[in-house]
Image: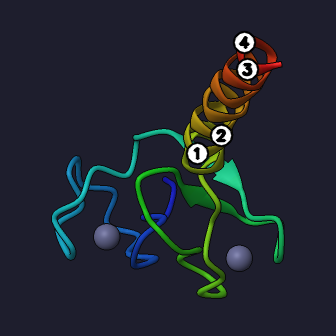
C-alpha cells in the first residue's frame, strides 16, 4: 500500500480518502528533495519547493523566438 503523494495518507483510497485527490496521477522526482511529487501540483508536496513545468518556460521561449525571427525578417527587408 502506497501513501498518498499529496497528504501522505496511507489508507490507499482512489481517490485519496483524506484529501480527495487521485494518488495515481503522473509524478516526477522533486529536484530539491528527490521524492516523487505529483505533476499537477505547483510545488513539491514534501519540501514546498516550486516545481517548474517544462512547458511554462518553453512557451515564452518559443514566442520569443518567433518575435526575434519576425524582427530579423523586418530588419532584413529595411536594409
Ligand atoms: Zn491525500
Ligand atoms: Zn521536494
Q: Which residue is mark 1?
A: 60
Q: Quadrant of the C terminus?
A: top right
Measured Cα–Cα span from mark 4 to mark 3: 4 Å
Nearer the observer, 54 or 72: 72
Measured Cα–Cα span from mark 4 to mark 1: 26 Å
> Mark 2 against mark 1, which lies toward the viewer?
2
Q: Quadrant of residue 52?
A: bottom right
> Mark 4 against mark 2, which lies toward the viewer?
4
> Mark 1 against mark 3, which lies toward the viewer?
3
Measured Cα–Cα span from mark 2 to mark 1: 6 Å
Residue 16 percent coordinates (x, y) = 24, 61
Q: Residues within 10 Å of mark 3 (few under 14, many from 20)?
A: few
Under tag 2, what secondary structure? helix
Residue at image point 23% right, 47% down = 14
Nearer the observer, 66 or 46: 66
Under tag 4, what secondary structure? helix
Measured Cα–Cα span from mark 2 to mark 3: 21 Å
Under tag 3, what secondary structure? helix
Residue at image point 72% right, 22% down = 69
Q: Which residue is mark 3?
A: 78
In the displayed structure image, the side of residue 58 where residue 76 appears, left or right: right
Dot 2 and dot 1 residues touching (CB under 8 Å): yes
In the rendered structure, find residue 77 and report the number of the disc placed on it: 4
Residue at image point 39% right, 79% down = 7
Q: Earlier in the sequence, mark 4 or mark 1?
A: 1
Whether 39 is drawn above or below 49: the answer is above
Q: Which residue is mark 2?
A: 64
In the displayed structure image, the side of residue 23 where residue 44 appears, left or right: right
> Mark 4 against mark 1, which lies toward the viewer?
4
Residue 28 percent coordinates (x, y) = 67, 48
Amino acid at each position: 500500500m502506497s501513501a498518498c503523494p499529496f497528504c501522505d495518507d496511507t489508507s490507499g483510497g482512489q481517490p485519496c480518502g483524506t484529501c480527495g485527490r487521485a494518488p495515481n496521477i503522473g509524478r516526477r522526482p522533486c529536484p530539491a528533495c528527490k521524492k516523487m511529487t505529483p505533476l499537477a501540483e505547483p510545488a513539491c508536496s514534501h519540501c514546498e519547493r516550486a516545481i517548474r513545468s517544462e512547458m511554462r518556460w518553453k512557451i515564452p521561449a518559443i514566442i520569443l523566438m518567433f518575435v526575434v525571427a519576425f524582427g530579423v525578417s523586418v530588419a532584413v527587408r529595411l536594409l
